Image (cartoon, helix red, strand yellow):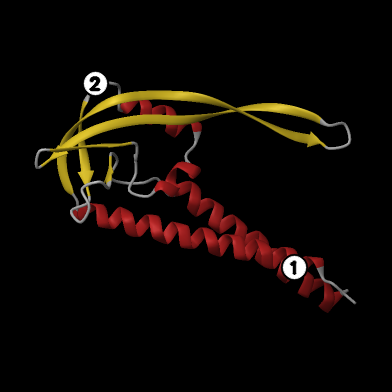
Amino acid sequence: MDIDIFIIFGSLLVVIGLSLSLILYRITRLNNNINTWKKVQGIIIQSTLDEVEDSYAYDIDEYNTTDSVSYKVNILYEYSINNNTYKSKRIYSSALVKYFLTSYQKKKIVKQFPKDSKIMVYVNPNSNKQSALIKEAPIVTIVILTITFIAIGAFFILSKQYLDKYF
């Protein structure tokens, strides 16, 4: 049984890239929809940047680990509509964006929204509980990852076909 690792690995990378493109599509669609959302005044109740230590094994034989610090944005804000008060932690219209933010972007967000500052909140007109602080979600990281996975996957698939043809 001839299992071709190049084709399997390349196909897996292309599937990951296509999955990222679906996430990108969803975030872009929500970015466009937020233009129709209501704008209301709000206030930042909490604004902190918490360090989260991640440990991961880099040498399985030795069971050594290295520590890496990442950051978690904790922003809580409050806004009122029709005498009803709502609280939210959502920064962007899509919750998926937080998984693609760099440390620099996270630090910038916390500086942009200090505690007790008055803010503009974007509120979904169909559900006053759904809101966002920032109108445009950064998509550059997702675009780069999508292109990278698809390109490397295609390279593996095509290189296998090239090797079979000429060698």
Secondary structure state at the residue bearing disc 1: helix
Quadrant of the rendering where the C terminus is positioned: bottom right
Residue under pointer 1: 8
User: Residue 157 placed where, x, y %?
Assistant: 72, 69
Q: Is residue 125 above or below residue 6?
A: above
Label 2 Cα neighbours within 10 Å, binned few <14 / some 14-19 / many ≥20: few
Q: Residue at x 32, y 56 (%)?
A: 30
Where is residue 29, by image quadrant?
A: bottom left
Label 1 Cα neighbours within 10 Å, binned few <14 / some 14-19 / many ≥20: some
Q: Residue furthest front?
A: 84
Residue under pointer 2: 116
The answer to the question of whether label 1 and label 2 lie on touching residues, with beta carbons closer than 8 A, is no
Q: Residue at x 35, y 30 (%)?
A: 75
Position of 22 with respect to 147 (left or right) is left
Quadrant of the rendering where the N terminus is positioned: bottom right
Q: Is residue 147 above or below residue 162?
A: above
Q: Residue at x 28, y 25 (%)?
A: 45
Q: Residue furthest left?
A: 82
Q: Using the numbered discs, state the Cα–Cα distance from disc 1 to disc 2 in whole angstroms.
A: 53 Å
Q: Nearer the viewer, mark 1 or mark 2?
A: 2
Q: Residue at x 47, y 39 (%)?
A: 101
User: Residue 161 placed where, x, y %?
Assistant: 77, 75
Position of 161 with respect to 108 (left or right) is right
Position of 151 with respect to 120 (left or right) is right
Q: Front-most of 17 and 127? A: 127
Identified by mark 1, the residue type is Ile
Q: Earlier in the sequence, mark 1 or mark 2?
A: 1
User: Residue 43 placed where, x, y %?
Assistant: 21, 28
Position of 45 with respect to 67 (left or right) is left
